Structures are given as C-alpha cells and as structure tokens.
Amino acid sequence: MKFHELGVVVIGRNEGQRLVDCIASIQAATVGVLVYVDSGSTDRSVEVAERAGAKVVMLEPNQAFTAARARNEGFGAIRQIAPEIGFVQFVDGDCILDAGWLAKAMAFLEERAGVAVVCGRRRERYPSASIYNQLCDLEWNTPVGEASACGGDSLVRVAAFEEVGGFLSRIMAGEEPELCIRLRERGWKIWRLDAEMTLHDAAMSKLRQWWIRSIRSGYGFAEVTRLHKTSPFRIWSRAVPSALLWGATLPACILLASAFHPLFLLLFLVYPLQICSIAVRKGLRLPGTWAYAFLAVLGKFAQAWGIAKFYWGQLRGRGGQLIEYKSQPTQS
C-alpha cells in the first residue's frame, strides 16, 4: 500500500479525551498527512492536535460551523501540503480508527477504479453505557456491498471528490449522503466493506440528547431531499412524509377530531400498535428491540420538528445552525 498517497482529516469541537484517543489511533497507522480542523472549541483540542504533530486548521466563526465545511477545509489543507495525495480518510474527532482499516480500504480502492468512497463497520465504543448508545450501534450496522451513501467516517478517492466539488459546506446535516448522490449521478460507486473501521463515542445518556439528535436528522432529511428532489438517486424520499405523517399530521387530525367527540382520542392507540409492529419486524429476541421501536416512533415527532425548523429557516432566509446533542466533555 502507498500510504504516502494517503491523508487523514479529523474534525472536532470540544471532544476532550475523545480527540486524544482519535489522534493516537491515527498515529498508530502510517499516513502521509494528518490535518485536524477545529470548529470553535473552548477546550484544549487545538493544543492537543498541535502537540500530536497534526496540521491544525481553525475555522473562522464568521460562517456557520458545519461538519461539511470542516471536512472541505481539511481536504483543502491536505491538497496544499501534499498535492500528490490520492486518497483522504475522513474521521470524526469522537472516533477511534481501527488499526487494520486503512490497509483494507486502500487495497479495495486501488482494485476498484470506479469506486469513489469506501466505508466499513462503525461501532459504538460504549454500547452498554445507555440504550441510546446501543441504538446508535444498531444504526451503524448498514448492509455490506454497494451502498447508496456513507457516514462521516470514510475513505474517499481524491479525483472523485474534486470532480463533484466536495461537500456542500452550507449543509448542516446529511452532508455525506448528499455528496454520495452527486457522486452516483456522475457514475461513481459507494461501497461498504465487511471490515472494522471506527469506534464511535455517542456519549448519549439522556433522552433529551436523543431528541436533539433526531431533530438534526429531520433537518437533514428535509434539506437533502429538497436539494435532490428530481434526482433518480435521491434518498430519504420516504423519511420526510413518514415523519410528517406520524409526528405532525396524524396527531393534529386526531386532536382536531376529538374536539367534536372525545372518543376520537382512542385513535392515538395507533402509536403503540406501530411500536409493536416495528418490534416484530426488528426481531423480538434481539436485545433492545422494544426500546428501539419506542424511540423510532417517538423520534418521528422530533424529526417532524427538524423538518419544520428547516423550512421555517428557508422562509426567513436563514441558513442552518449547528445542532449539538453532546454534553461538554472534561478538559483534556
């Protein structure tokens, strides 16, 4: 493997010890260039990255902080430092890179010239810490093979990334699937390998954090589907109407009908029935199935709020702002 042709971009904001662990895992591998992009951290993240020998890029606060903007800035820094770089691994600052991932991912991209992005198995670092972490681990377990999208951790082919102009910096959520839509429109493929890639620390212990994360998901659903409403490769085409149906339209109709007769309130029983339906489809014997089903239904309300938040911002001519669900970590 030609690891001198490989660069790594880490993005973060107040990740504390998570960033320390992230950079240490990357240093264990042989890479050409390591760039850390900081989005206004108030902890010692910048100092940690500089001490580790990473090239640090600090985003100016005159524009909204987004993961897409951070990754683009990091990519640009790598291209300036090492124009010969052919592949870039993006890693979120709350993740630990698996020791064997880069070799497997590089080998796959070198063998498959038509593949633009490759990702592997992202696991939750502490799945037993909370039901929310456990559900994230289930979410990360996507099908192996050709995929429609990737997540924040992925290895990209520089030529393909530059061909489509990288991420859309203004997108607040869902920037990776949006990038994949444009890549697929150009004939590139996205691939998910059956290989360990990263350990992610969601650090969610409260329902409020899950709720905010679901609001962000809804916001991303709305923005990406609006951008690519005519694309044959559009994703989440069902996610927006589903969230609006279960999280807004249906409860509003039931409450309106109950104004004429209180028995219409019994229609709210459709929600526990939906929870049971999801649990059965997921598999009753799997751990966390009922919690997953309950939060999947509850999340529709938060997603609907996120969709409304996006369109309200559009009407007011305002872009999205960073939506953070994590608690501030201890100082590193």
Image (spheres, helix red, strand yellow):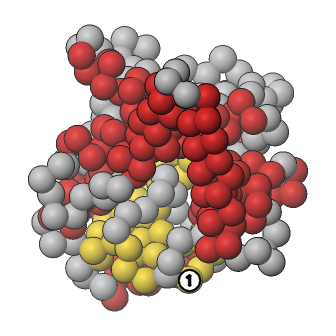
**In the rendered image of this protein, does residue 204 appear above or below residue 112?**
above
Residue farthest toward the right in the current orientation of the protein: 129
Tell me if mark 1 has few (under 14), some (14-19) or many (20+) residues whose alpha carbon lies within 10 angstroms of its own: some
Which residue is rendered at x = 49% and y = 24% of the image? 260
Specify whether 265 is left or right of 147.
Answer: right
Residue labelled with disc 1: 194
> What is the quadrant of the C terminus in the image?
top right
Q: Quadrant of residue 198?
A: bottom right
Q: Is residue 219 left or right of residue 226?
A: right
Q: Quadrant of residue 184?
A: bottom left
Vertically, is 131 above or below 307? below
Vertical comparison of 103 with 230: above or below? below
User: What is the three-letter code of the residue carrying label 1?
Assistant: Asp
Side of 10 where 224 appears, left or right: left
The image shows residue 131 at horizontal and vertical percentages of: 80, 52
Percent from the top left, x then y, of residue 185? 15, 64
Pinpoint residue 294: horizontal percent, then vertical percent: 70, 51
